[in-house]
Amino acid sequence: MKFGGNAVASVERIRHVARDIVAKHTALESIASTDGGSLNQIVVVVSAIKGVTDDLIQVCDSIMMGERSKVDSIIHNIEEKHKSIASNLCSNESYTRELSSIIDALIKEMSDLLKGMMLLNEVTPRSRDYMLSFGERLMAPMLCYALKDIGVKAEHLAGKDAGIVTDSNYGDARPLMDTTRLRIRHRIMPMLEQGIVPVVTGFIGSDQHGNITTLGRGGSDYTATIIASCIDADEITLWTDVDGLMTADPKMVKDAQVLREVSYAEAMEMALFGAKYLHPRALEPVLDKGIPIRIRNVFNPECQGTTILKNPTAYPSKIVKAVTAIRNVSLIDVRGSSMVGSPGTAGRIFNVLGENRINIIMISQGPSESSISMVVRKSDLDKAVNALELNLLGRLIKGINVTDDAAIIAVVGAGMRGTKGVAARVFSAIAKQGINVIMIAQGSSELNLAFVVEDRYAEDAVKALHDEFELDKINR
């Protein structure tokens, strides 16, 4: 079970998670085992309190800009927030003292790191990951002691201590699965056999040298699926603050529906194309083993949410299951006659962007080969254009055109595969709204059809497609 940052944002919410979800499921499973069933143990993965990771990112940015007073203010708020929760969480006074001592030690460790970073006025990728780890490392012991306080045996572990070993790509590390599997099984399985609930920090691991690494934003989902794969879990539940994956963002479409079931492939496409509450790489560790993943609402546990399966049976007649949007992106179009028929052109362009750590979200090239269109995050736009101008403009490419405010709209569904006329319906619906399509891309899998529009038309485009495919009626 993984719990998101909003689920543990206060004393009351932490107690709710401990008492009404973890302890309740443990009790249910214990009852099942006394009736002759097998005992299914629970591993808990927890995120930082909502907003804390953003605050720590701001700390790192402020150090680089020499804003000492801003750094002190943010750290003070983080410290007060966690100390207040720790002092009010447990009814058992000895647990309160133990928990407060753990939190104090972590705050001191964070302050010591901060002093070193500020002394050098430098934030390296390694020190940044170390700083960002404190959100989860402060949270895990608090949920652990909330469980202890109600009689559940629990032990808190950092990702490193649980056995998650990654490469040294700080900020976006990937697990070394063979080593990780051995270490997690060695560390976690004996705890489960003793009836202990491991409470593991999400988002963080360590490289082979023992340095703390992070798995990328939203990486607690990834932590949960890594551990599940290693211990051959029966099921993964990602507890969030929504009822499940939806046919569209409910902020855009009021009658968006919760999807009861989707396939791994569909869920991955939805995550990659902007659907929230699922890390894009979270499905990788469990694909081969076929472990089902449930996305459920911690504030509405009666709702069964969305189940992600290898072979779902729901909605067999539905062509499209979801319409998603990626906002805050920009379109870069590079042109040049020297690009035509020149092997390695795309490679040189992508290599320049890759060396500057710019991720390309979407690519399109016409058969004339005279232009390549790329979508990048808006925050990467200036860096991307500068890199292309410095390295390739006037030689390989003759011109760069930019659309600052763009959005990627994608329709997703396994039913699109081999179905004729899907593209016609999509673009007809968009044309009726008077929206111009700037760029189009569809992979050979036919699981999604994506296109780019100006950002101001994003909401209208999503609504039009949701209506076209009657997704408001998907559960009827």
Image (spheres, rainbow, N blue to C red):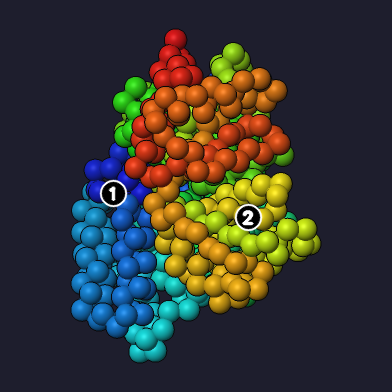
Residue 78 occupies quadrant: bottom left
Give SS at disc 1. Answer: loop
Residue 448 occupies quadrant: top right
Dividing the image into 4 quarters, which one contains the C terminus? Answer: top left
Mark 1 or mark 2: whose residue is earlier in sequence: 1
Q: In this view, does 13 lie to the left or right of 121?
A: left
The amino acid beneath tag 2 is Ser
> What's the distance in space between the residues labelled 1 and 2, CA to CA?
48 Å
Give the residue at mark 2: 371
Q: Nearer the viewer, mark 1 or mark 2?
A: 2
Examine the rendered structure and indicate whether residue 225 appears above or below residue 302: below
Q: Is residue 158 visible?
A: no
Q: Is residue 334 left or right of residue 379?
A: right
Give SS at disc 2. Answer: strand
Who's the residue at 31% across and 64% down the image? 55
Name the spot of residue 184 as percent of width and height, x first: 63, 54
Residue 147: assigned label: none
Who's the residue at 72% across and 39% down the image? 288
Name the spot of residue 136 as percent of width and height, x first: 41, 59
Give the residue at mark 1: 9
Q: Is residue 367 visible?
A: yes
Residue 269 occupies quadrant: top right
Q: How crowded is mark 1: few (under 14 residues within 10 Å), some or many (20 or more)?
A: many
- Which residue is the extreme one toward the bottom? 119
Nearer the observer, 302 or 403: 403
Q: Is residue 320 left or right of residue 276?
A: right
Examine the rendered structure and indicate whether residue 222 appears above or below residue 313: below
Examine the rendered structure and indicate whether residue 320 appears above or below residue 1: above
The amino acid beneath tag 1 is Ala
Who's the residue at 31% across and 75% down the image? 62
Name the spot of residue 145 as percent of width and height, x first: 35, 52
